[in-house]
Image: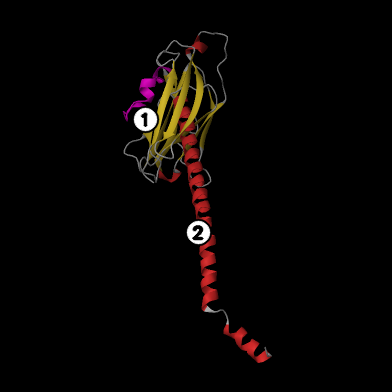
Amino acid sequence: MDAPLRNRRAARGFSLVELLVAIVLAVIVLGAMVPLFVHVLKRTSADELRVDATNIAQDRIEQTRLLAWADITSTNLNTTSTTFGDGRFGPTYTLVGESRPYSITYVVDPPASDSAPQKHITVNVSRPGPDGFVTTADTIIQNPAAGESTSTEAEPTNLSMTVWFDNWAYVKSPGVVIVRVQTNVTPNVTTTPAPGYQMPSAGHQELTWSGLTGGPNYTYRITCHSSKATYPLNAPPFRLWSNGRLKFDTYPGGD
């Protein structure tokens, strides 16, 4: 074959048959990889759901720790009422931006006893459906009354309470405040630990009160005012035995 003929064929490029063969091969290769992509996406989605369920379970454990001892019962935690614990408990929870709720069950052992030395709380968060699973978190809460029977036991001091938010920008004036009630004197003494009301801001999204006294003789309550809530979000009264941390949903049911 002479050089001019080879040059003419080279300039002509791929033939239609060659192009069709290349397209068919590409479709076969990509088609073989589609199941792999689908599997990876499903696995990633499932992992995200499990992480969310774990966070929900741990959050419910922390919320339970803030309840008064007598209120920690299976009946209360599994209630559908929106009045107990400001509606932070109950059998279901739907994350913001999702439509499928998580199912939540609480097991308290013993289920209802104010005299027990401790209570074992188990929180089960499940996802119904074909991709269903169950995530469990548990804790043991000591009866604070046990500390009252030991006169030599010192009250924990210099404790701190930190408040954080789903969306700090929705906190409105006057902001967030913690109130302390000393219950071993008559009448009870109510004080507002410094610095009183606080407002979160960019770079200051967590609020902390320090130098708090714990033990059975001091009860605390935290109030958070939100521009997106229909009422102030009040945490139920609780006693401090160690440093605490509390989350507020400042836009319930919103995004």
Indicate which disc, 2 or 1, sits on the residue closer to the N terminus. 2
Q: Which residue is mark 1?
A: 91
Residue 177: quadrant of the picture = top left
- Of helix, strand and loop, which one carries label 1? loop
Question: 229 or 22, which is in the foreground?
Answer: 22
Would you name the residue on which mark 2 appears? 31
Q: Residues within 10 Å of mark 1 (few under 14, many from 20)?
A: some
Look at the numbered discs 2 and 1 and tell me whether their residues touch, using CB distance below 8 Å: no
Above or below for 115 versus 225:
above
Indicate yes or no whether the magenta region holds residue 81.
Answer: yes
Q: Position of residue 2 (x, y in %)?
A: 68, 90
Depth check: give the residue in front, 26 or 245: 26
Residue placed at 53% from the left, 56% from the top?
Answer: 33
Magenta segment: 69-84
Q: Looking at the image, which is closer to me, 130 or 187?
A: 130
Where's residue 84, x and y in %? 35, 26
- Of labels 2 and 1, the one closer to you: 2
Q: Is residue 237 magenta?
A: no
Residue type at mark 1: give it. Answer: Pro
Q: Nearer the viewer, residue 198 or 241?
A: 241
Q: Residues within 10 Å of mark 2 (few under 14, many from 20)?
A: few
Taking the spot 47% from the left edge, 28% from the top edge, the residue there is: 61
The Cα atoms of the two marked residues, 2 and 1, are separated by: 43 Å
From the top left corner, tell me how far across and down residue 129 is, in percent: 39, 38
The reply to whether residue 192 is in sight is no
Asked if one can make out residue 230 in the rendered structure from this viewpoint, the answer is yes
Hey, what amino acid is under mark 2?
A: Gly
